[in-house]
Amino acid sequence: MPDDSFDNAGSLDEPILTPKEIDKYREYLSAYGKEIFFAEEEVIVNYGDITTSIDLLVSGEALVEVPVNEKWIPVAWIKSGSVIGEIAFLDSYPRTARVIARTSCKLFRVDRAAFTELSEKNPDKALEFISRISQIMAYRLRRIEQFDAVEQGRDDMRKELAADLHDQTMSELSAILMHLGLLKLTLDGHVESAADIEDLVAMVKNADVNLRQLVREKGHDDLAVVGLEESLRIFFEGLENEPVPFSIKITYTSNQIDQGGLPGPVATDLYQIIRQSVLNSVEHANAEIIQVEILWNQEGILFSVKDNGVGFSQSKITNVPEAGHFGLLNLKLRTERVGGYVDIISGEGKGTRVVGSIPITRRSSEDIEPHTVQYSLNA
C-alpha cells in the first residue's frame, strides 16, 4: 500500500511533515522525547546555543532570524509540520540563527542521545524518521533550485536571492549531514572511514558559515523597513510615471496589512506576487481596469489581482519552466513556499484573475475596514 506522505511528489507544495506523519513519529519517539510549549515572542532556540535536540513543530508559527548589523532579520517563516534544529542534532555546534515563536507553539523535542538509544533498540524506526527528514530537505532543495533558476540575473531581486540562498543552503546541508550521521553510525569501528566522514562534515560546515555570511551582508531588505503597504504604494506610483499604450485604472484595496506582525519573508513574497501579477496585466493583458485586493483576517491573507484584458488559454498555465512561462511559475513557487496556494483563472477574451491565500495568523483581534486607493496610468 503506498505511503500517503508522498502524495505531493511532483507537485510544488511546501514540503513539511503531514499531521499523520507527526502523530506517527511522536508515537515512535514517545519514550525518547517530550512536548514543550512556547508563548508568543518566546525564544525557542537562541543564536549561539549549543544543543543536540531536534524539534517537530506540532502547532503554531515561528520565525527564523539571523543577526545583521545589530538587528534581528527574519529569513524564514515556518509553520506546523516543520523541523527545527536538524543540523545541530548531528554536529553539536552552536546555532547560527535563532528561532522565535510568532504565535504560541507546541513542539515535540528529541535529544540526540535519546535518539541514539532508539537507533540501538529499533533501528528501522530511527532510519525511517531520518530518511523522511532527508527526503523533505532534498525535495525543498530541488524546488528552490528551480525558483533560483527563474530569478537569476534580476538585479532588483538581489536581496531576495540572498534569503533564498540561505534556504537552499540549509536544505542541502541538512540532507547531507543527516546522511553523514547515518553513515557514521553504520561505520562504527572503521577508523579510516569515520575520519573521512569527519572531513566531509567539516567541509559542509565551512560552506554553511560562508553562505550565512553572504546572507548577513546582502539579506537586509528595504521592504522590511518601510512595510508592504508603502512598498506597494511606491510601486503603483512608479507605474503612473511609466509610458503605456492606453489608459489603465488600478484600484488597490487592503485592510492595513502592516498591522498584525506580518513576517518579512511573507511580506516580501506577497509583494512580489502582487507586483508580478500587476505587471503581467499591464504589459500583456491590454486591460483597462486592474483590481488588486489584499485582506488579512484571523484565518489568513486573501489576495487577488483581476483585470478585464484579453486573457489567455488555461493550457498556458504550467508548473514547469521549460514551457517558458516563468512569470506564472514564479507566482506559484512564491505562494506555495509560504504555505499558501494560488489559482490563475483566465480565458481568451475573458480577462485574468490571480487569486490565492496564505494561512498566517493575524495578531490584531479587531476587524479593520478595507480602504481603497486608485491609481491612473495614462497613455
Image: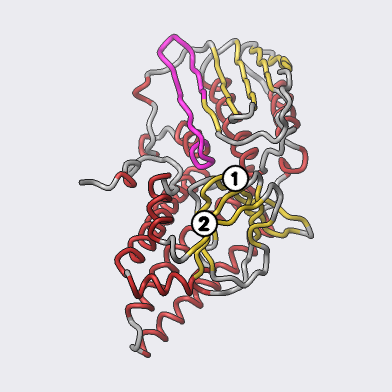
The residue mark sitting in front, 1 or 2, is 2
Q: Residue at x 29, y 66 (%)?
A: 124
Q: Nearer the viewer, residue 333 or 244?
A: 333
Q: Residue 123: horizontal and vertical position, in percent? A: 32, 70
Mark 2 crowdedness (10 Å alpha carbons): few <14, some 14-19, many ≥20:
many
Q: Please say whether residue 350 is one of the residues in the magenta stretch.
A: yes
Give the x, y percent position of residue 72: 73, 55
At x 51% / y 78%, what residue is drawn?
202
Q: Is residue 229 left or right of residue 136?
A: right
In front here: 360 or 73?
360
Q: Is residue 179 magenta?
A: no
What is the spatial separation of the Cα atoms under label 1 and label 2, in whole angstroms?
14 Å
Residue under circle 2? 108
Is 307 above or below relative to 182? above
Magenta region: which residues?
Answer: 335-355
Residue type, label 2: Phe
Query: What's the residue type where badge 1 is placed?
Result: Glu
